[in-house]
């Protein structure tokens, strides 16, 4: 048996979480056998969960060959992998007399084994459950959010069916581990709050209230099913509550929720194209059989996109085509509602999003300051939200999942002292913070005020809000202590002046540091989405997509001109000229406004918050010459 697999084989099973987990569990089970340690010949029988037989077959092939593709036929291969399933009528002949060969037999029961195989087996093993480390590693490799080790430990204590269901789920918050098997066989479903009972999720609540009215009218026979909204796509970053929203919507409408994902479809069976398509069709049919259900498909972007190029284009095309067929046909099934979720809508095939399929798009943003307190209050069973604002307002863009996790820590503190939650528990559960030095605060304040001044002088905004925090969170990575917020005046057709103003505003923070402090820091650069990244991206699109270079020409679509888009040398020089011009313009404006730059930075450090309007700079604005282009 191979102790390592090829890079091609690893790339394959990385796309198949079920096979990857089976491979990890298989290696752990057989590691003490002579066949694994010494590559000795013999017959190894593995007893696995019936639903996982196909996955363990593929895992066994990888364990024996280490290859992405390997033949296991009696006439061509020295080794073999065979399976026996209880109740199966398939006849399988196993040649146990193979010199220096290894045979792995996968079965769900000793009783399913032929007598000859039972006698010939050198060892019969029940495959061990995966470890928590296996689960956490697989979630990382497949791009799922990290799990706490204690949550992973609870998951691997469950049966194989529950592991199958939850391995690829985005969030495991609120899962009642230890009671799942009991719930599965119980007539009482898990209590899920209705959407109208949950704080936040305002965008989804508006659509749901309209849908609930139409759905009730359809059930009473007053409305044709064809006039009811039958599909929607929830769009938002991880942790904002898309999965919770699906369950709450089902509870609101009194429907059963059938939850699945492209990852679950792909990990079914051996993970081959036929396995995925069968799993996809089975999910639709399962939801249809409920006579009124919501089919929730998480990570909708993972089904593929026919515009992609690469070795998997045939696979992706077949998957997308089948999904388009099913989503179109299911629109005519009375009582069937299709709900998807994604944080990468740009990766979804355009045909999936057209009218008649996922035509309704619901943006779920991070919660507002008011919603943060309300969400934490909800998880703390009604602890007054107004008393929580002093803490939740200081958090750095927490998701509902972050707030739910925080509530568990708060309740644990109170539970350990055998009392109700108090404000001191909330304070003790907040992330640790570090105090910024006066020198650092002044630099950050100068940077943010620079953005504000150039934004006001651009003529494209009437008000700018600036905030400064004197502390940063210890446990977070890259973060900013300052923030500038402003509303740009509507520009239906952006002009070159408008785009140059956007670049100038983005570069103004670094320019202010140079004007006032003599040098600039890494603030405003370093990471994707930074000021410098924004400015460079606009300049690239101006030249490559909008025809605003020295020669009007179209080079690529604006959506394709991203951070990794490589420009020809001539176009790259034009981008540099635009950036250089607006860099100089930003510095020129700030030199004229240096008195305000200094005084406003001092005020921001002292107050922590400023609101600026053109009138606050009117004397300087009247004197300022228009920037050169």
Image (cartoon, rainbow, N blue to C red):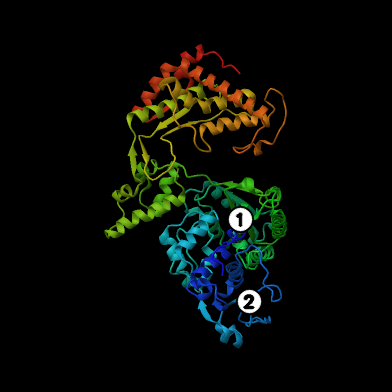
Q: Are marks 2 and 1 in contact (CB under 8 Å)?
A: no
Question: Is residue 550 among the parts visible in the rendering?
Answer: yes
- Between residues 429 and 544, which one lies in front from this camera angle? 544
What x and y, as percent, mark residue 125?
Answer: 51, 78
What x and y, as percent, mark residue 85?
Answer: 61, 79
* Secondary structure state at the residue bearing disc 1: strand
- Between residues 187 and 312, which one lies in front from this camera angle? 312
Question: Is residue 380 among the parts visible in the rendering?
Answer: no
Outermost residue to the top = 623
Using the numbered discs, state the Cα–Cα distance from disc 2 to disc 1 in whole angstroms. 40 Å
| Quadrant (top left, top right, bottom left, bottom right) of the C terminus | top right
What x and y, as percent, mark residue 145?
Answer: 50, 54
Q: Which mark is residue 383?
A: none
- Between residues 237 and 26, which one lies in front from this camera angle? 26
| Quarter occupied by residue 61 | bottom right
Image position of 525 with respect to 299: above or below: above
Nearest to N terminus: mark 2 or mark 1: 2
* Secondary structure state at the residue bearing disc 2: strand
According to the picture, the residue beneath numbered tag 2 turns out to be: 82
Locate residue 355 relative to residue 439 in the image: left or right: right
- Between residues 3 and 30, which one lies in front from this camera angle? 3
Image position of 15 with respect to 587: above or below: below
Locate residue 3 relative to residue 75 in the image: left or right: left
Q: Which mark is residue 339?
A: 1
The total of numbered circles placed on residues is 2
The 10 Å Cα crowd at callout 1, few under 14, some 14 to 19, many 20 or more, is many
| Quarter occupied by residue 565 | top right
The 10 Å Cα crowd at callout 2, few under 14, some 14 to 19, many 20 or more, is some
């Amino acid at each position: 048996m191979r102790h390592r697999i090829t890079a091609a084989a690893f790339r394959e099973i990385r796309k198949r979480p079920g096979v990857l987990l089976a491979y990890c569990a298989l290696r752990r089970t057989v590691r003490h056998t002579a066949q694994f340690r010494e590559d000795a010949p013999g017959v190894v029988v593995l007893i696995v969960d019936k639903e996982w037989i196909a996955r363990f077959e593929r895992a066994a092939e990888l364990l024996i060959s280490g290859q992405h593709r390997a033949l296991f036929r009696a006439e061509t291969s020295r080794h073999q992998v065979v399976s026996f399933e209880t109740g199966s009528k398939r006849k399988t002949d196993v040649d146990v007399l193979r010199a220096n060969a290894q045979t792995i037999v996968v079965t769900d029961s000793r009783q399913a084994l032929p007598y000859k195989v039972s006698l010939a087996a050198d060892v019969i093993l029940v495959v061990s459950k995966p470890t928590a480390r296996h689960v956490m590693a697989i979630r990382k490799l497949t791009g799922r959010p990290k799990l706490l080790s204690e949550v992973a430990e609870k998951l691997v204590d469950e049966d194989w069916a529950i592991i199958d269901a939850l391995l690829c789920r985005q969030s495991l918050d609120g899962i009642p581990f230890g009671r799942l098997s009991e719930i599965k066989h119980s007539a009482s479903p898990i209590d899920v709050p209705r959407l109208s009972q949950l704080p936040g999720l305002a965008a989804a609540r508006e659509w749901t209230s309209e849908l609930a009215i139409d759905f009730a009218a359809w059930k009473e026979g007053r409305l044709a099913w064809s006039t009811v909204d039958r599909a929607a796509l929830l769009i938002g970053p991880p942790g904002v509550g898309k999965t919770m929203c699906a369950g709450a919507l089902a509870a609101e409408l009194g429907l059963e929720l059938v939850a699945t994902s492209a990852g679950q479809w792909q990990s079914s069976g051996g993970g081959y194209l036929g396995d995925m398509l069968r799993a996809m069709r089975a999910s639709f049919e399962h939801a249809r059989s409920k006579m009124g259900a919501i089919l929730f498909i998480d990570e909708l972007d993972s089904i593929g996109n026919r515009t992609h190029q690469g070795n998997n284009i045939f696979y992706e095309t077949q998957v997308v085509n089948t999904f388009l067929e099913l989503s179109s046909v299911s629109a005519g099934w009375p009582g069937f509602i299709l709900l998807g979720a994604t944080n990468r809508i740009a990766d979804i095939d355009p045909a999936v999003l057209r009218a008649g399929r996922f035509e309704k798009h619901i943006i779920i943003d991070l919660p507002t300051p008011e919603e943060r307190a309300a969400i934490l209050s909800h998880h703390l069973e009604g602890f007054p939200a107004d008393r929580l604002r002093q803490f939740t307002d200081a958090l750095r863009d927490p998701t509902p999942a972050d707030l739910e996790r925080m509530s568990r820590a708060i309740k644990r503190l109170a539970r350990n002292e055998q009392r109700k939650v108090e404000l001191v528990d909330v304070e003790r559960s907040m992330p640790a913070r570090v105090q910024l030095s006066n020198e650092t605060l002044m630099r950050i304040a100068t940077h943010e005020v620079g953005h504000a001044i150039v934004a006001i002088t651009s003529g494209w905004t009437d008000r700018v809000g600036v905030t400064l925090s004197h502390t940063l969170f210890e446990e977070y990575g890259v973060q900013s202590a300052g923030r500038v917020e402003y509303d740009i005046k509507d520009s239906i057709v952006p002009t070159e002046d408008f785009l140059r103003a956007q670049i100038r505003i983005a570069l103004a923070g670094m320019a202010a540091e140079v004007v006032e402090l003599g040098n600039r820091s890494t603030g405003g650069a370093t990471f994707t989405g930074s000021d410098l990244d924004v400015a460079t991206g606009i300049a690239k699109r101006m030249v490559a997509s909008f025809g605003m270079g020295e020669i009007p020409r179209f080079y690529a679509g604006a959506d394709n001109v991203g951070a990794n888009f490589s420009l020809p040398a001539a176009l790259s020089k034009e981008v540099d000229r635009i950036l250089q011009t607006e860099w100089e313009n930003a510095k020129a404006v700030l030199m004229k406004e240096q008195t305000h730059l200094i005084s406003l930075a001092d005020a921001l450090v002292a107050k922590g918050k400023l609101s600026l309007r053109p009138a606050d700079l009117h004397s300087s604005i009247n004197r300022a010459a228009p920037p050169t282009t």
